[in-house]
Image (cartoon, rainbow, N blue to C red):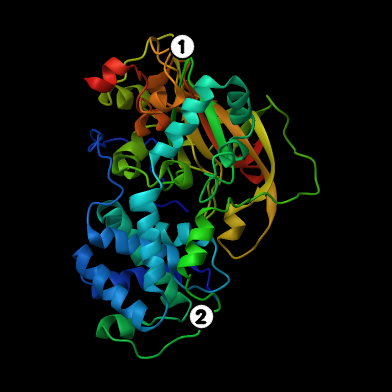
Amino acid sequence: MDGVHDIGGREGFGPIVDKADDKPFHADWEMRAFGMKQASASATSWTIDWFRYCRELTGPVDYLTRPYFDLWLTTLAAQLIDEGYLTLDEVKAGAAAFTPKSSRPPQTPEAARAFVKSPRSFAVSVNTPPRFALGEKVRCRLDGGSGHTRLPGYVRGRVGEIDAQHGGHVLADASARGEHRGEHLYTVSFASADLWPEANGSRDRVFVDLWESYLEPA
Amino acid sequence: MASFDGKTISHIHQELHSHLPSEPALRTKALESLLAEKQLIDPAAVDAWIEMYRDEIGPKRGAAVVARAWVDPAFKTRLLADATAAIGEFGFAGHATGHLQAVENTPQVHNLVVCTLCSCYPFSLLGLSPSWYKSNEYRARAVRDPRGVLKEFGVELDEGTQVRVWDSTSERRYLVLPERPKGVEDWDEAALAKLVTRNSMIGAERELSPKRANA
């Protein structure tokens, strides 16, 4: 979606702050919000891409100004309401009216620890050969679609070259709609000079992981 | 079942904005007591996540991997070929590291990792990301002005050194393998690991000589 989250290359942002910060959390509420988002019950239809999409749908002002883990937690609440496990009336009243039976129960501590130790693969076999060859020039589509996508605005319409082929991976756009389907994933390498006017003459490059349907031959 | 409908979620966000306390600690408390009462969370699992990422999992893991790559060429080859398998030798593969790629700094190349669309990060290897990595400023500027960003971190690059920025737009994650500093040829792996900083494994730091570490 063409939201404020698609921030790469936007201008007017100031210096990077807290560069020496080395704490995972800065307040108790951050820890609780993080832990709740990780361990909550959900519908079995939940996917990480649907979560990312729901976070992108935070109102633009809130998205840019509210603290990081607060956005995670509020997105979790929005999803639980959407799934019917929590209601806005309960949020308004600050009191539970019913105990739902979620299709994916809350995580146990043992399951949480096992999850962190289990690398998860998003590879999906795809029956077609990759459309693009290593080194081939490709142009990114101009239109990212109105749903979730991982095609950032700053590469749309731009030409890059295939740096690596990764085989089939879960297509984020489809997964955010509840469809599990694979598509060839590539790393595409762009000359900074082809992306930004002020990088004219630079040898620097930007590498972006992009799915096959985002690309066309250049 | 989720609706998978953007308009529905936008509307819910708007309502939550109006009805949840604005102050983050109060908002968290309000939601935690509701979710616990409704049995949508197991507080012990919430505690487990906090313990793991506050006390157990952090950049020391990544530093151990980098130091091993510096002293063991065969391991370095394995790390560059399949980083998920290589960190698995340490038991570090897991949360958000199912498709890990190591990118190597050389005198000619400097790598920098960002996630412009959200905040993707190799959690089970480096722990939770630093606040600057998640900031709007870093996400906006790293792809467009990497040299300006690096200068703010104290990294001055020669014109001849190519910057490679890696935008984590898929489930693949990136680890920067910094260069082994000069003057520590006789150091063992454990001592070398102490030189490796979190920022250097994201690419926001380059020179890891002990002089700098003590400065």
Q: Is residue A119 above or below residue B14?
A: above
Report the residue at 35% width, 91% height from top: A97
Report the residue at 67% width, 49% height from top: A123
Residue B96 drawn at (x, y percent): 51, 48
Q: Where does the C terminus of chain B fall, quadrant-wise?
A: top left
Residue B107 badge: 1
How many neighbours does mark 2 have within 10 angstroms: few (below 14), some (14-19), or many (20 or more)? some
Report the residue at 29% width, 78% height from top: B33
Tell me the kind of residue under disc 1: Pro
**Secondary element at image label 1:** loop
Residue B170 drawn at (x, y percent): 55, 45
Residue B73 drawn at (x, y percent): 59, 20
Residue A102 badge: 2
Q: Where does the N terminus of chain B fall, quadrant-wise?
A: bottom right
How many neighbours does mark 1 have within 10 angstroms: few (below 14), some (14-19), or many (20 or more)? few
**Secondary element at image label 2:** loop
Residue B205 drawn at (x, y percent): 35, 25
Q: Is residue B85 above or below residue B208?
A: below
Q: Is residue A55 above or below residue A83?
A: above
Residue B190 badge: none
Q: Which chain carries label 2?
A: A
Report the residue at 26% width, 83% height from top: A94
Task: Give left or right: position of A217 versus B55.
Answer: right
